[in-house]
Image (cartoon, rainbow, N blue to C red):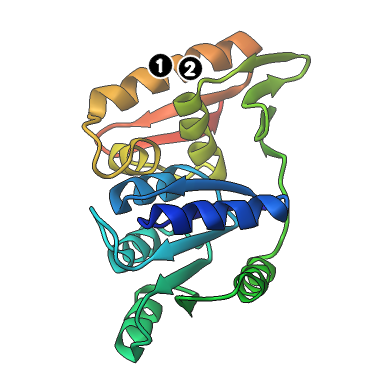
Amino acid sequence: MKVLIVEDEVRLADALGHIMKEQNYVADITHDGTDGLYYALTNEYDVIILDIMLPGKNGFQIVEKLRESRIRTPVLLLTARDDITDKVNGLDKGADDYLTKPFIPEELLARIRALSRRQGEVIIDEMIFGDLSLNLSSNDLCCGDKSIHLAYKEFEVLKLLMSNSGRIISKETLITRVWGNDSDAEDNNVEAYISFLRKKLAFVGSLIEIGTIRKVGYRLEESQ
């Protein structure tokens, strides 16, 4: 299981990371709300542990933005106050559960397990589109007997295109999901990575192409 921890209390964040490690979970940790949103938008997690009071962006803003971006990763909110208003607000924004500090590790782990079961603990190692296979562990793009390794952002761009089954993805969506909503990335950054990917698709000899829908975005298409 892969977990994102967004907690500005460094000692608590480290303790949470240790608890995850003891369970053989993989944990990414950040202490800032803006960074936390970037991690959540650009990576795949089974569960997100999210403090409410954070620098940059608070937990409510983060979970609201995730749901607006159609990211359905289960979110467990942490609150220092046993305040029903905070809890109702968090759930209304799209959080799945909440836990009041202080808490015992056993309860935290039980809630994480419950959320992951609700999500469905299905581990997918590769994505398929036409004659293409994208390995989600190694970032390798394969077609028949040929393969090539993708750089991180190449991988994220192609994964987003493949996961949308040929639907059009706008440049704005690519920037938000791959570079982050607060990044300085512009349209030319997207265009550059689309060009890189087209060359790699040609290298492996795929029939799949990245089509440009003028003034709208990109989608995967199978050449005739």
Residue 205, image x, y percentages:
64, 13
**Secondary structure beneath label 2:** helix
Looking at the rendered structure, the kind of residue marked 2 is: Arg
The residue shown at (35%, 90%) is 84
Circle number at residue 1: none
The residue shown at (62%, 21%) is 207
Query: Real-space Cα distance between discs 1 and 2?
Result: 5 Å
Q: Give the labeled residue for mark 2.
A: 198
Looking at the image, can residue 164 be seen?
Answer: no
The residue shown at (49%, 26%) is 152
Q: Label 1 neighbourhood size at 10 Å, few (<14), some (14-19), many (20+)? A: few
Along the horizontal axis of the image, is 23 left or right of 69? Answer: right
Label 1 with label 2: CB-CB less than 8 Å: yes
Quadrant of the image occupied by residue 213? top left
Judged from this view, the residue extending furthest toward the top is 203
**Secondary structure beneath label 1:** helix
Looking at the rendered structure, the kind of residue marked 1 is: Ser
Q: Label 2 neighbourhood size at 10 Å, few (<14), some (14-19), many (20+)? A: some
Examine the rendered structure and indicate whether residue 89 appears above or below residue 128. below
Examine the rendered structure and indicate whether residue 41 appears above or below residue 175. below
Q: Give the labeled residue for mark 1.
A: 195
Residue 3, image x, y percentages:
57, 53
